[in-house]
């Protein structure tokens, strides 16, 4: 049997030596000051064993990783409504590109690029009584950890400088694929992205996807079929325009964020999460991808 | 335990009733005359058990399914050379679109769209002594079936009318991403696509991908890591611009062809193949996709 | 010698009979209610003679025609600054398309599509003390008509529904090609577009372009070279993605607006303006284009 | 009155001093060896006076300038057929780009980009008995100079390396916008482009466009309206994706070629031609554009 702790430690020692640790995202000013020497890896098996190395207990901004959680909530609320308003195909484009949305009349290609995630935010606002509060509660329930919170400084920072997201949201509105006001939707969306979690908390949050839709305390009702679909979307669209590369090298479904986090998992087996704030050119954590590639190569644990 | 024969028969009965059986591909005149009422499904487990319904023993033109076999041969010969000349990302575009190739200076996004498959054909021609003969032998060895052959009438039919492929190949040549002459490469490529197999033969050919790189008679040397990568590319790029949809609905890696065939598989478990010549708008077999969606939904057998 | 009055009357009689009068722009709610049976033509020679038929004295929303006036003001203030921030090439795209702006990193192709016109608005705001007041005065001086005014209801109507313009302006801001705030720039821009003029007033306003840069009362200082450039831009970019068609059929520099107005001119000779609110698919006045084509064909008066 | 000889000599002296003379086109190997210090300017008034400086009598490869002559012949033969198969709008793209042609289903934007010019070549082949002979005769008649000829080495050179044109032509064929075979059309097209003329011969050839459709010896029957249209297309599309810039700086209709030639004219007045083989990034002659800009600025002779 594999000894995950020993494997993670070996990988950590090797990967931390990388000279090129990538570039910390600077387009959200509040994120630019995080130390790029941070590096943590955490693994949690379905039967509840935990393994961790480095800064795996330190919270960071989960950013786009939140898109999967928001999608799950939207699907749990009303799946039909979701697929009327966006698709499930990889875009072949960077995550913040508007061109395709324009050509395709305001229908985002998938829920994990910015445009699609903003439509999901709109759906949540329409369905939830107190959107920001309810969504936070959902994430807390999922992880059974009530210390998780928004970082309002980060949310505010994006509100001041996120002109590309304002452009995207106005474009969606111009195509009548937005029910609520631009400001309302982006206020929610920037909060959603600002949630802070550590690797070990993220491992708990993603447990539901590795476990056929049942979360740790049995409180989220995703069907097996819904879970299959969400997992498939993560594999084909979860790493921006590097999804093919991640599937090719790592071979696990997952989701990355510009805060430097990655959450991935092997269905029926484990969740593995990494954090290192330095990003490669496509916006994915450099050390994180390296660690995960080594992990699946060494352990031969992948969906393929 | 699942009784695959009973399941396949139930699916067959249900799917064959579909009123809309799609449209037979007409852009290759020789293919246009195939009867669209043909429908077969075949499943082969890794331990060698076979299950089949309908026209599962009737040969058809495998067309783009051959791209995976050609890719495997190219990787077996010289993997490094492959990834210097093309990528592994979904294109977000139809399979025969030239625009992206032009914008990205003649580097195809992946080996399963036409442009990338043509580069793979070019690599095979440069590495094989008698390209057409050697490639056919490779496919025969893989399946341990020496009756498999090219359909030269279909190959000739494409040569006369495949202007889009001529455009693509000339564009590759203009970007200096083609070593051999346009005519030589397309002669090989049209032959490669014209190979005829039945579902049961295809199940044997794809055994290697479900079996970590070792084919039935142990004659193909793909490493586990190479197999993981090829399988990942099938999942992210194997169904044209419907790869997301296929992953979402079916949840298996695989490859389709405009001849109406689909080969898919669950690693370490089984290969499942379907054939029905009527295509949907994206160029994938209508009944085939339906059958596979029902299969993974009923059996809960998917990589996710 | 040509008798313009007789010619205009003959054209009017013929064109007004058209059964298909186009579609009134509906994306600005305030404009949607204009009667599409309105039709006027006016011609003013450089030596001050006036000819008019139909509703040539009735004011309408000049919309995009204002872009040429704003461009002229920006060039008169500081030409260098203008060409640092945008180009002079036709876009080959509809006037409100964002894709090209995104690909070209926030540098608009020309000052007569929406994106470029918004940059011009930004320049005017940075250079003028009281932007809205000063710009209106500039237009009034140009025409020597102090009754010309903004229609604040139309401006407000666009502010409420102009999501595409908000998307464009935020995209410009994200590329740092906007000095002022999005709201400030669009408030100015929507006012600029809401100016109301009649054909006869427009003929006076465009006199400066036909007269080598000297306006009627000699109060605008454009050099001959600046005028040549502005006129060239009108010819290549003045009719959205129908600029080629307009040059081909009419053969005069000019500018159209979605309010249904067109102003065109033959340098050193005359200005001719038309108004009819029904638009063709490209957003240009249907009867206006018809009338101008007949005019230059009958009189053989074109720059070619 | 302007003394053109003195003006041309002054411009010549000034422009020839430019340190950056551009880059000679290398994609046609036969053209790559032309000396880039060649520079000639020629002007011919409608009343038959000639003025020249530098290498104005030396023949060069007219390349894309031939597109206007081919278009004129096609229009003279059957104008309706032309506009059924292509448009009259600037493309906003480089002259050899395939993307737009693909998006717009094989209908070229205009007859002066490669795709449109190839359709014109196809039309000529369908209408002429001996296409190459007849077209050469047409050009000879137009200039009244029977020494003009194809350069078959240049034509052959393009045939060997013009993969981009083969791609374009096959794409047209795949969209069924080509009546004749790809090889036949390109053989004609490469010959058409290989015609050699000097500036003084080109001035005679373009006389017809400056003279309302009547050529020097009265042998070409273009109507005034046809001439207006051809001239308009030259202005909006004659300089690749620098047509706006040329109109802006020079303000004359005209056409350039990658051989380094430019022919421009002021209707009813004169034709001015330049030759210098060094090109700018957009493919237009560097010294030629400089000379023409100085010319229209000094003489204030432009259509605007």
Image (tube, coloured by chain):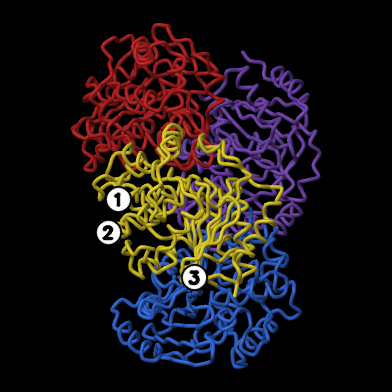
Chain colours: A purple, B red, C blue, D yellow
Residue A244 to residue B68: above or below: below
Q: Position of residue B242 (x, y in %)?
A: 41, 39
Chain letter for mark 3: D
At x 52%, y 71%, the residue is D303
Q: Position of residue D153 (x, y in %)?
A: 44, 34
Callout 3: 10 Å neighbours few (<14), some, many (20+)?
A: some
Asked if residue A120 can be seen in this view, the reply is: no
**Looking at the image, is mark 2 or mark 3 earlier in the sequence?**
2
* Direction from residue D6 to residue D230 in the image, left or right: left
Disc 2 and disc 1 in contact, CB within 8 angstroms: yes
Q: How many marks?
A: 3
Q: Position of residue D255 (x, y in %)?
A: 49, 56
Q: Residue A90 shows which numbered tag?
A: none
Instruction: Look at mark 1 in the image and give the residue it sits on.
Output: D123
At x 38%, y 87%, the residue is C8
At x 64%, y 29%, the residue is A272
**Disc 2 and disc 1: Cα gap in Å?**
9 Å
* Nearer the observer, B263 or C229: C229
Disc 2 and disc 3 in contact, CB within 8 angstroms: no
Disc 1 or disc 3, which is closer to the eye?
3
Q: Residue D269 shows which numbered tag?
A: 3
**Looking at the image, is mark 1 or mark 3 earlier in the sequence?**
1
On the same chain, marks 1 and 3? The answer is yes
* Direction from residue D52 to residue A18 in the image, left or right: right
Chain letter for mark 1: D
Callout 1: 10 Å neighbours few (<14), some, many (20+)?
A: many
* Nearer the observer, D26 or C262: D26
**Disc 1 and disc 3: Cα gap in Å?**
32 Å
State which quarter of the image contains the C terminus of chain C: bottom left
Q: Residue D78 shows which numbered tag?
A: 2
């Amino acid at each position: 049997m594999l000894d995950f702790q020993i494997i993670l430690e070996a990988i950590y020692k090797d990967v931390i030596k990388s000279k090129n640790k990538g570039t910390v995202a600077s387009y959200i000013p509040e994120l630019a000051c995080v130390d790029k020497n941070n590096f943590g890896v955490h693994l949690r098996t379905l039967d509840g064993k935990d393994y961790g190395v480095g800064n795996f207990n330190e919270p960071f901004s989960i950013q786009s990783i939140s898109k999967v959680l928001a999608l799950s909530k939207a699907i749990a609320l009303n799946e039909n409504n979701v697929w009327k308003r966006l698709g499930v195909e990889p875009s072949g484009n960077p995550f913040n590109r508007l061109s395709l949305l324009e050509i395709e009349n305001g229908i985002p290609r998938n829920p994990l690029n910015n445009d699609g995630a903003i439509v999901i935010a709109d759906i949540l606002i329409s369905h939830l009584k107190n959107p920001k509060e309810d969504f936070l509660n959902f994430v807390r329930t999922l992880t059974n950890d009530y210390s998780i919170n928004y970082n309002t400084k980060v949310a505010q920072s994006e509100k001041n400088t996120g002109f590309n997201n304002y452009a995207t949201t106005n474009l969606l509105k111009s195509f009548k694929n937005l029910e609520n006001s631009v400001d309302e939707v982006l206020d929610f969306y920037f909060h959603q992205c600002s949630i802070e979690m550590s690797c070990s908390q993220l491992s708990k949050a993603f447990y539901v996807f590795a476990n056929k839709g049942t979360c740790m305390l049995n409180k989220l009702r995703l069907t097996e079929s819904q879970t299959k679909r969400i997992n498939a979307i993560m594999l084909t669209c979860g790493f921006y325009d590097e999804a093919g590369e991640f599937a090719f090298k790592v071979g696990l479904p997952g989701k990355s964020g510009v805060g430097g986090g990655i959450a991935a998992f092997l269905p029926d087996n484990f969740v593995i999460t990494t954090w290192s704030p330095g990003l490669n050119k496509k916006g994915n954590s450099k050390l994180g991808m390296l660690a995960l590639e080594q992990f699946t190569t060494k352990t031969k644990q992948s969906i393929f």
